[in-house]
């Protein structure tokens, strides 16, 4: 039997490195509430991401909810349904109305040419997603936001370390959210961050994640609890030392996938965006069943038979979720609807072997129409 290949596997430092990192905590007994590791990780991340401010959170989703609340948004938020549940849930949970804009078929990010038709007098913000490590059209979005006085919040959960013309992805928009979940390119086990240029937001983010406590005897507003603990921050400090090597390894694996799957009729790969240094977070392929001879689901099943676990990601679209009880019409985003039916992301993680990529591709190539 061939060995099982999962779609992802967390990057981890050596046990020795992690133990060394957490050892001081047995002296200080300072386990959470913005301790030394927390502080050090914020500084190192600001440096790595080349951003002015980084505020850590327990997870990316909590950061996103905090951002929406702290920016005082009300009304409609233009976003895309081709994303993880978190993006749309955060909007709805904050009492805002998501307005779904379609995506581009080549890089899966928001189709900027369709944003303006969605703007009404209730629109307060745009919340686009940098999908798979691809960058949104950040200039196009900024132009529209300036023209209409809208805030821009990026879901950059997939885009850790991505740059455009050497500018870190966290420098676009008003605030960006990163996720440091175990499955992401950089992880703190669970974790996330808000990054932003406006330094006046820092204090309020820090208070929000600690119940709205503003002083030893004062609580000025109703905050939540979303503080990253010292053990997670320590994991981040270790993983950050190796993240460049992890991205290099991912690049090599993606190049192999691309080489083996290039020019296969019926298999569309993501475009390579000019000037963008990707983090190779995911390797999606979009299957045209007419040209390839099999549907996405058939490819998925065939891989499963060989113990290779790909993922239908993103599928289903968030605007079709049962939880929204038919409130949204996915036919308003036809490109996203089509891509979601046909996309498959392949196994990709730091310690995936190049031979495994070869084996995965040979399973797919054998399915080809004669
Ligand atoms: C992972 C992810 C999130 C949520 O991040 P968590 O840290 O798991 O809360 C949000 N958006 C996207 C696109 C993601 O992939």
Image (spheres, grey):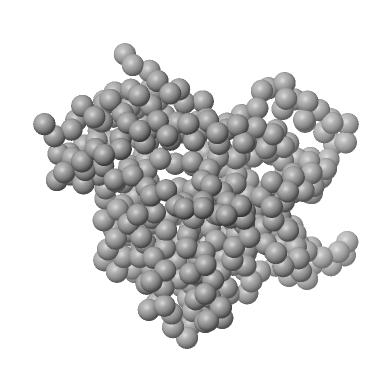
Task: Depth check: give the residue in front, 102 or 358.
Answer: 358
Vertical comparison of 301 with 67: above or below: above
**Up-down relation of residue 172 to residue 299 (above or below):** below
**Residue 337 in view:** yes
**Quadrant, the C terminus:** top left
Which residue is situated farthest in the bottom direction here?
121
Direction top: furthest residue? 1
Q: Nearer the viewer, residue 85 or 322?
A: 85
Residue 124 pos. (x, y %): 53, 77
Please report the residue visible at 24 percent of the width from the left and 29 percent of the height from the top: 365
Q: Is residue 259 left or right of residue 156?
A: left
| Residue 207 in which image quadrant | bottom right
Whether residue 327 sits left or right of residue 63 in the image: it is left
Q: Quadrant of the N terminus?
A: top left
Where residue 15 appears, as percent x and y from the top left, is 68, 22
Q: Quadrant of residue 259?
A: top left
Residue most extreme to the left: 370
Can you tell which quarter of the image residue 154 is in? bottom right
The answer, for residue 211, to whether it is visible in the render is no
Q: Is residue 345 left or right of residue 250?
A: left
**Residue 363 picture location, percent across and down:** 26, 26
Residue at coordinates 43% horizontally, 35% vertically from top-left?
254
- Compared to residue 142, the image places residue 23 above or below, namely above
Q: Residue at x 38, y 71 (%)?
A: 113
Residue appearing at x 42%, y 69% in the figure? 112
State how many labels appear.
0
Q: Does residue 294 appear left or right of residue 222 in this picture?
A: left
The picture places residue 24, in percent across and down from the top left corner, at 84, 31
């Amino acid at each position: 039997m061939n060995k099982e290949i999962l779609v992802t596997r967390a990057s981890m430092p050596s046990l020795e490195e992690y133990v060394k990192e957490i050892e001081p905590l047995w002296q200080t007994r300072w386990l959470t509430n913005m301790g030394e590791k927390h502080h050090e990780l914020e500084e190192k991340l600001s440096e790595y991401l080349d951003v002015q401010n980084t505020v850590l959170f327990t997870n990316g989703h909590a950061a996103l909810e905090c951002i929406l609340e702290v920016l005082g948004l009300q009304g409609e938020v233009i976003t895309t349904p081709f994303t993880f549940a978190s993006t749309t849930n955060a909007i709805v949970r904050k009492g805002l109305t998501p307005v779904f804009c379609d995506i581009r078929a080549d890089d899966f990010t928001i189709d900027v040419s369709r944003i303006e038709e969605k703007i009404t007098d209730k629109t307060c913000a745009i919340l686009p997603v940098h999908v798979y490590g691809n960058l949104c059209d950040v200039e196009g979005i900024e132009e529209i936001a300036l023209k209409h006085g809208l805030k821009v919040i990026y879901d950059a959960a997939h885009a850790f370390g991505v740059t455009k013309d050497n500018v870190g992805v966290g420098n676009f928009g008003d605030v960006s959210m990163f996720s440091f979940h175990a499955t992401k390119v950089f992880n703190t086990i669970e974790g996330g961050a808000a990054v932003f240029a406006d330094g006046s937001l820092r204090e309020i983010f820090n208070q929000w994640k600690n119940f709205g406590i503003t002083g030893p005897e004062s609580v000025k507003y109703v905050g939540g609890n979303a503080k990253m603990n010292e053990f997670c921050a320590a994991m981040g400090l270790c993983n950050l030392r190796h993240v460049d090597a992890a991205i290099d390894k991912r690049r090599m694996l993606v190049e192999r996938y691309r080489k083996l799957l290039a020019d296969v009729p019926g298999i569309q790969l993501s475009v390579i965006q000019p000037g963008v240094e990707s983090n190779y977070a995911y390797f999606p392929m979009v299957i045209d069943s007419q040209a390839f001879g099999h549907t996405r689901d058939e490819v998925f099943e065939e891989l499963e038979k060989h113990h290779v676990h790909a993922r239908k990601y993103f599928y289903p679209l968030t605007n079709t979720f049962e939880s929204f009880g038919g409130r949204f019409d996915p036919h308003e985003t036809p490109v996203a609807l089509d891509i979601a039916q046909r996309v498959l992301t392949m196994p990709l993680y730091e310690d995936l072997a190049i031979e495994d990529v070869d084996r995965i591709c040979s399973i797919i190539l054998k399915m080809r129409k004669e």
